[in-house]
Amino acid sequence: MVNTSVSPTRQISKIEAIKEKSNFLREPLATELLEETTHFTENAVQILKFHGSYQQDNRDNRVKGQEKDYQMMLRTRNPGGFVPPELYLTLDRLSDEYGNHTLRVTTRQGFQVHGILKKNLKAAVSAIVKNMGSTLGACGDLNRNVMAPPAPFKNRPEYQYTWEYADKIADLLRPQTEAYYEIWLDGEKFLSVEESPEVVAARQCNTNKAIFAGKEEPIYGEHYMPRKFKCSVTVPGDNSIDVYTHDVSLVVMTDNKGTLQGFNILVGGGMGRTHNKEETFARIADPIGYVAKEDVYDVLKAIVATQRDYGDRVQRRHARMKYLINDWGVEKFRAKVEEYFGKSLYPFKTLPKWKYKDFLGWNEQGDGQLFLGISIENGRVKDEGNLRLKTALRRITEQFSLPMRLTANHNVILYEIEPSHQEAIEKILQDCGVITNPQEIDDLTRYSIACPALPTCGLAITESERVLPGIIERIKTVLSKLDMASEKIVIRMTGCPNGCARPYMAELGFVGSAPNTYQIWLGGSPNQTNLAEPYLQKLLDKDIEKFLEPLFVYFKQEKIEQESFGQFCRRVGFESLREFSKTYKPIKPRRIRKNQHRVSISDEMFVQLKAVSETDKRPMNQIVHEALETYFSQEKS
């Protein structure tokens, strides 16, 4: 067995060479950080990613003939989405002192701070680490943030196990180089790097040469991973973390008493792809087996070693583990993992059906305390107009010192709430215009996700976060016109094909393909259990209504009971969708005849009708129309 991440005779990419020459993620970053420049060179930028930051420029501020508006995006590492109160207050302060006055919840349960200048980057990273946070490994070619369900159920041990193992896996696969602490904290370490003894022992255990014994990076080696590597831990049936989209997903398996026995393992998920490059594609994970709890670290190292040693280091577009599994097949991949592991995996255990959960609203933890899930549209924590979410979260954290968990749908869960504090917390949120009742949130908005895209993401082809709210309003108008306002559709949008908002699992996915233009994906499920497929290569923003109306009409006419839009598209097939759309004649808006009789209602009934209209965000005449339709259908039956 060859125990080397890159063979001396093997051709490597430019970035592989940069990593090799970096002295374990130190240079040229450390030198350039001390220089009084506005930005880093390309080589330093590649190393900066491992430390949790991307160099960007604000395209809204570009001026011809002038230097780009360089700024840094800083991303935190929060296994299981955990954010202690002192860290949140620090991030809130940094976003105002050094950033653009907003925070962004990511779809991997971390925070991003945008707009930091190069000269302020060290102060920002240092403050995060000193307040129980970290940015190490939040970006770059190594294990990213480990995800887990955010629900703080204290009376359900399986949920507690996901938090425990998200932390331990994050520590196991954390880079061991001292570069992070040398560069950002002048060599000083803090509480955030303390690890459990079992993790330390597991990292050094050299089963079948899965590690580089005695080296500075025993698991990664000097070249780290071929590309980013993503892990998650969840419980059977809980798909709050998009279980099929990760390189590795572990499913906690307990006995009847709630005692941990082991883990089901899925491998090979990944969303990134490139337009017009058919060799790149989104893929969902495959089950490969089950492992007892005492062997989980060795199996993880074996999976990492397989991708480390056999993943493509020449073509970065082909470097994710999903491509290795696709090229080899699941059986060959499992055999290689078992070779590193030193024994066979057990058969994959039967699981219940997966269900998406967002845990919004007020809930009981199971120990007498409460938790509150707050919906954050597109994950942007900000103060804008009547909605002052940033102010609300700061006031609550300052007053009650609550921990929070970030979710995969870029929402926030506050927990460990004393029941006696519920009313005060509710008042702060209401005063700041924050909705806490999930029934008052429009379903299209509630289940949607968008990536940040323009103006800061360097990969963005077109808009995403800034335009999705308006597009959702337009979709709602089409649905209302068709008397379909109650439909729930999972909508996800990205400004490029890299898939950060996981649009390829959506029922309706928008993927940026040109300015104001999107590739359309259809056929995902509400519970994110199957991959959508590309339906249309280029849809101009202005044509969204014209495109969607025939699809919605066909869905309304032919759907079966309890069938979602995505499931319908998959069942009837794209050929039928196209054929119906081709022959469809647009529905003309209803005209009210001048001599049409008016119907009066009592003042008391009008007040009730108006209140329902405002709560449901639907026109009063639509509510009356639906009520009459229901009444007449009951009369006929």
Image: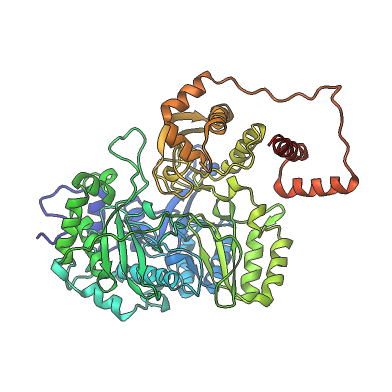
- The answer to whether residue 565 is above or below residue 94 is above
Q: Nearer the viewer, residue 465 or 455?
A: 465
Outermost residue to the bottom: 197
Residue 405 location in percent, x, y?
A: 51, 66
- The answer to whether residue 88 is above or below residue 105 is below
Question: In the rendered picture of this protein, how many numbered marks are placed on residues?
Answer: 0
Q: In which quarter of the image is the C terminus?
A: top right
Q: In this view, does 622 lie to the left or right of 344?
A: right
| Snapshot quadrant of residue 530 | top left
Q: Is residue 341 left or right of residue 362?
A: left
Residue 453 location in percent, x, y?
A: 49, 45
- Residue 509 shows in the view: no
Q: In which quarter of the image is the N terminus?
A: bottom left
Residue 584 location in percent, x, y?
A: 55, 21
Q: Residue shown at 71%/57% (left/top)?
A: 433
- Residue 585 shows in the view: yes
Residue 372 location in percent, x, y?
A: 60, 66
Q: Nearer the viewer, residue 155 or 467?
A: 155
| Coloration of the structure image | rainbow
Q: Residue shown at 71%/71% (left/top)?
A: 424
| Snapshot quadrant of residue 390 | bottom right
Q: In this view, does 531 lie to the left or right of 92?
A: left
Outermost residue to the front: 637
